[in-house]
Amino acid sequence: MNSLKQRILSAVKNDLLQIEKELAANLNPHLELVKQVAGHLLFAGGKRLRPLLMVLAAKTCGYEEPSVYRYSTIFEYLHAATLLHDDLVDGGSIRRGQPAAHTVWDAPTAVLTGDFLLARSLSIAAGAGIPAMIDVMANITENMSQGEIQQLHNRGSLDMTETEYYTVIERKTAVLFQGACRSGALIAGADRNCQQALARYGYHLGMAFQMADDLLDYTQTEQNTGKLPGADLREGKLTLPVIAALSQAGEADYQVMRRIVSSSGFSEQDFRTLIEYLHNCGGIDYTRQKAGEHVNMAKEALHTLNTAPAVTIMEDIADYALARKI
């Protein structure tokens, strides 16, 4: 896994440097406070995967213009906007290993900074002069807001189905990956087949990425993930490892898990017990299996494209989505 990560980082080193420069250069708020709040999240880390996907998608289609880095910031600004809003809605206190913005400043400031980042991403998209990119952005924001509302509606419910879970992560995560990849093709002026192939790749990568992310809540430490273990569960979110384990458990195991899951104030020992049940009842393995299926579908979507170096990197990223530890 470490060699895969290093191979990816080595291949995209210059791209990530350019993305980082453009994120700082294009923020352009009128108020210093907005810059501070946005920067608190934007420059606290992050993999820059979404803007990187747009750059790689464009390169796959033969587009090498430096302007692609400016347009790629659309997807990091939009991602950051959703994180600012989500942390407030979910009551999250830690993000990327530091206090969430609404705990450092206040809720209205965090919300409005998120609104600014969303507007900034739309302004940059409009500057491309490609109407289809605005359609992509509108679709992303509509789906992500509805995904968050659906997740909020399901909060605390122990009856959430696997199908409902897939709908939530499609709207909250996969559409943003999909939009980044399709926008790379749009910037490059690629044909419809290329656009669709890259959009399929982004969709399946996003699904796999979110499932893997949900696994980390039960397999990694706060030091690795930058958030408290069990944070999703404490916020009342049932994710696939729990949903799958509950569906496969016998009555006695089901009742133990249900008792822990239904209490937001569960102890550390309860959480460790739950993790054992997730392993024993197959929730962890099942989630890995389903994520792996999406990784394979993401890579298959690239088979219709050329053999440009960017395609190889995108295949590696798909493999790393599941293999990663953070």
Image: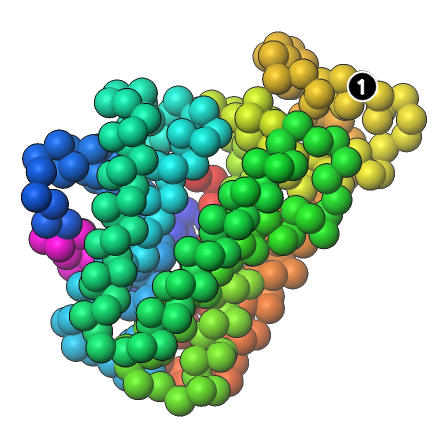
Q: Is residue 129 left or right of residue 229?
A: left
- Please say whether residue 120 is visible from this viewpoint: yes
Residue beneath the point at 63% across and 53% down: 167
Tell me the crowding category of disc 1: few under 14, some 14 to 19, or many 20 or more residues within 10 angstroms, Cα based: some
Where is the C terminus found, in terms of image quarters? top left
Q: Quadrant of residue 7?
A: bottom left
Magenta residues (range): 18-26
**Image position of 262 with respect to 164: above or below:** above
The extreme right residue here reads: 251
Residue beneath the point at 52% across and 71% down: 200
- Please say whether residue 209 is visible from this viewpoint: no
Q: Is residue 304 left or right of residue 245?
A: left
Label 1 sits on residue: 256
Q: Position of residue 96 (x, y in %)?
A: 34, 32
Residue beneath the point at 85% across and 33% down: 249
Residue type at tag 1: Val
Residue beneath the point at 67% across and 42% down: 240
Dot 1: element = helix
Q: Position of residue 199 (x, y in %)?
A: 47, 72
Q: Position of residue 11 (x, y in %)?
A: 28, 63
Q: Position of residue 56 (x, y in %)?
A: 32, 69
**Image position of 293 with respect to 63: above or below:** above
Number of labels in the image equals 1
Q: Is residue 172 magenta?
A: no
